[in-house]
Image (cartoon, rainbow, N blue to C red):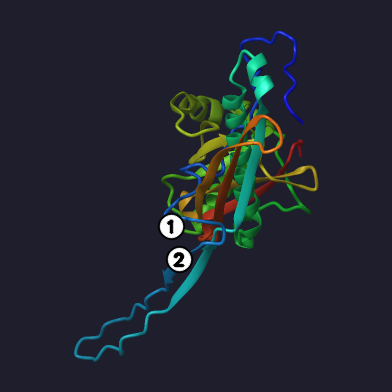
Amino acid sequence: MSLNFIPTVWAARLLVALDKALVYAQAGVVNRDYEGEIRAAGDTVKIGTIGDVTIGTYTKDTDISNPEALTDAEQTLLINQAKYFNFAVDDVDKAQQNVNTMDEAMRRAAYGLRDVADQYVAANYASVPTANLVGSDGSPVASGATSAAYDHLVNLAVKLDEANVPSEGRFAIVPPFFHGYLLKDSRFVGSGAAAADARLGNGQIGEAAGFRILKSNNVPIAASTKYKIIAGHPMAYSYAEQIAKVETYRKEKGFADGVKGLHVYGGKLVRPAAWAVGTVTNAAS
């Protein structure tokens, strides 16, 4: 449907849409260690892993065992997501309007691509091992009771501690209502919320329980009421992307300028144990 800017006098500014904070695919939540050069959807990144080395006990004047063969495993990060945009602005519309609709449309297109990728990364919570889960769809943790939200973050931190995940650089991504409960807890307000003044990442709201806390409306929801809070370390998830094409063109049938773009990307939870997932509900226990 073409933009209809005829013949009304239009304001010199567009009413900019209200956007969600895009959190999951940003640096500090994912890593881009294997991004390299991505040319098209379907490209792959091979990730090698060396297994553990056996440690033996040395006895004086006794031969040590024969050298063991190193074991390796390979994971494949597949660039299998391809999303595009394609829009046109009619010449007559451009002549009538007082604002640069093309620029705003490009911004909206870029945001839309990023939002889809953000949700794609968040959906990988299902690959987290059972040992790193707090609560479940069948038995979610209620987050509305006194101190429950903060205590829930502590439980997720313990899961990561038990999995030997480094403490430095940890994050937790929470929905807005969960942040509201944290604001009612003096342990967060007294220390973590103050750190929001020095926020570095999109959606960051403070620190708590050893986590950099980020807020997002893209937190996955199961069965309409069960929110999946992902806590972890950037080493866990590798993400790679490329804006493969952005092309301008003249619309063949009509008088309009068109723009189309192609975004290819992929991700993999390469260290599942470096994520922990809590299933919470927006209710008091």
**Which residue corresponds to the image point at 65% horizontal and 48% vertical from the top-left?**
278
- Viewer-side residue, 220 vs 167: 220
Of 255 and 112, nearer the camera is: 255
In the picture, measured across the screen, residue 273 lies left or right of residue 143, that is left
Callout 1 secondary element = loop
Q: State the image coordinates of residue 196 (x, y, percent, origin top left).
A: 49, 27
Residue 175 visible in this rendered orientation of the protein? no
Front one among 168 and 142: 168
Q: Residue at x 33, y 81 (%)?
A: 56
Residue density around tag 1, few if under 14, some if 14–19, many if 20 or more, within 10 Å: some
- Tell me which residue sits at (47%, 74%) in the image: 73
Tell me how far mark 2 sits from mark 1, CA to CA.
Answer: 8 Å
Residue type beneath disc 1: Tyr
Q: In front here: 147 or 130?
A: 130
- Quarter of the view holding residue 177: top right
User: Quick check: 65 above or below 95?
Assistant: below
Q: Which residue is drawn at the image coordinates 38% and 80% (left, top)?
A: 70
Q: Quadrant of residue 216?
A: top right
Q: How far across and down, in percent of the image, does residue 95 sit? A: 64, 17
Give the SS element for disc 2. strand
